[in-house]
Image (tube, coloured by chain):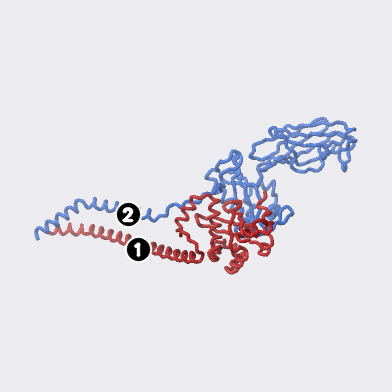
Amino acid sequence: MSKVKSDIRIKDLKWLIIIILITLVLLVIYLKEYAINAKIENEAIINTKNETQQASQQENKTSQVEIQRTDEDVVKYLSGLDERSRMEYYCGEYLKHIKYKEYEDAYNLLYPEFKENYFPTLEKFEEYVKNYYPKFFAVQYDDIDRQGDIYIIRLKIVDATNSSKDSNNAESSKDNIQRMVIRENGFNDFVMSFQVNNIDENNVDNSTRTDNIENNN
Amino acid sequence: MSNRSDFQVKIINFWKKHKKKIFIIIVIWLIIIVINQILKHRKPAEKQPSTTYTPHTTVMGDGDEEVPEQYQKPIEEYIDKYFNYCNNGEYEKAYELISEDCKKNYYPTLESFKGYVDEIFKGKKKIYNIQSYSIVDDKYTYNIRILDDILANGTSESFELGGKTYENGYYYYEEKLIFTEENGELKLSIQYIDDSEPNIIVEDENFTVRITKKVADYESETYTVQIDNKTDNYIVISDGKQKDEITMNYNGREKNLKNKIANLYIRPHSFAVREFTFENYFDEGRTADTLKFNAVRVLKNYDVEKGTTQENLDEAVQLYSFEINMK
């Protein structure tokens, strides 16, 4: 009888061991998942902190108060916009970097081949931007054209100081017409380039640029 | 000790009795957990930005017609392959992708095709986009726009168009690509729709008209016409001295010649061959009804340099119009 009992125990112990092993494997999986999630959350907190620090620095610099949006918020916001509004948002992001003198951030938004062609270094880009854009400017969006998945948006860079002084004299306005070219890969995921103008001409007269043709059949 | 043994026996008996059930429950539980984990970590399908760009929805005809799904990707890949060969100057490979009928009619030699490609690409890297135009008679017509890489130049480059130089901006070249399916394979034609030999022969006492060939492309039809003069007089069909000398009626719509032809006069007992091109968009579905010579002049004398004069008309043997039924 005792031998029979012993056999039963040995046989059933195998099952118990299997179950214990499975449970252990499961536990390991869970712990691993937990560790990964914890790491991700940790990184997210660090990133958010950095962003917040950058934002507060920026706020200090510009004396502007802006609510820091997370990527998710931006994506959510953009998903509710039509394509023109999204393109305007992207242009706005680029111009905001210019306005706040975040040249590297603006530079990073540019299409790599465009950078190679026109601004191989950040310094060259910075030099151009400083010369081209007025110290204080506003933006007026004009027409938009789409070529496949590429958008061409025409906008007017309005020199805030100049136009207020010479509001009655259109001839002396230094407003610049600029085309911006954008390809959107996904929400808040885009590359762009822009019409590079001759700096000297900008200071003379830009009105002729509006005569350039956009397309032709 | 005895109690403990009993307890052990009870557990063992319970285990023995229910172990299969317990094992099944654990396995199911495990499966659920694994599936749960997989689903949890699978990224939700990313929402794509809304766009008005619908390359496989037709814009002509009734509009909003969709190219069948099984053709969409193959057509995209076909165009991409063709375009990249052109872009990279691999003329032979691009040439091989064009249907034999299209080659025969429009690009009989590789050199002629090379000339066509060079004229568009001008040795520069280009980009393109496509738009389905129409679906008629199982022909899938796409419009392709070819333009400079505007993302790489920001529309900053100057270009020439119509003899004028533009400081910056962009323009695009447009072409129609027509796809048909033959024996399960896609065939690409550039502009070309089809060709035929109508063999229409009509005559009167003065001349015989033979329409020997018709070539249709996306936006026009070209007819090869031979006219034999049976008389001792000059026969003038067209020399620009009369209005609407040659027209074609397409389902009630009168159309003038699209191409400029050399003065069409036929010397006595001679013949002349000309190509008449009329604008006729393939996807409009209009067919040719009647070819009209609206000012046939049978003249005793004709000055080929001056064209028809009032004196010629005053002395004309016959002045009339002539119609050819194209059906």
Q: Are marks 2 and 1 in contact (CB under 8 Å)?
A: no
What subunit carries mark 1?
A
**Amino acid type, label 1:** Ala
Question: What kind of element bears circle 2?
Answer: helix
Q: Position of residue B198 (x, y in %)?
A: 71, 36
* Residues at marks 2 and 1, CA–CA distance in whole angstroms: 17 Å
Total numbered circles? 2
For the point 17% across and 57% down, the residue is A8
Q: Residue furthest left?
A: B2
Which of these two is toward me, B327 or A23?
A: A23
Quarter location, residue B118? bottom right
Question: Which marked residue is nearer to the observer: mark 2 or mark 1?
Answer: 1
What subunit carries mark 2?
B
Q: Any mark on residue A35, and which?
A: 1
Q: Position of residue B184 (x, y in %)?
A: 56, 44
Residue that label 2 marks: B33
Q: Position of residue A74 (x, y in %)?
A: 47, 56
Q: Position of residue B181 (x, y in %)?
A: 58, 44
Q: In the drawing, does residue A162 fall left or right of residue A96?
A: right
Question: What kind of element bears circle 1?
Answer: helix
Viewer can see residue B123: no
Q: Any mark on residue A6, and which?
A: none
Quarter location, residue B316? top right
Which of these two is toward me, B26 or A129?
A: A129
For the point 56% across and 46% down, the residue is B56
Q: Which chain is blue?
A: B
Q: Which chain is red?
A: A
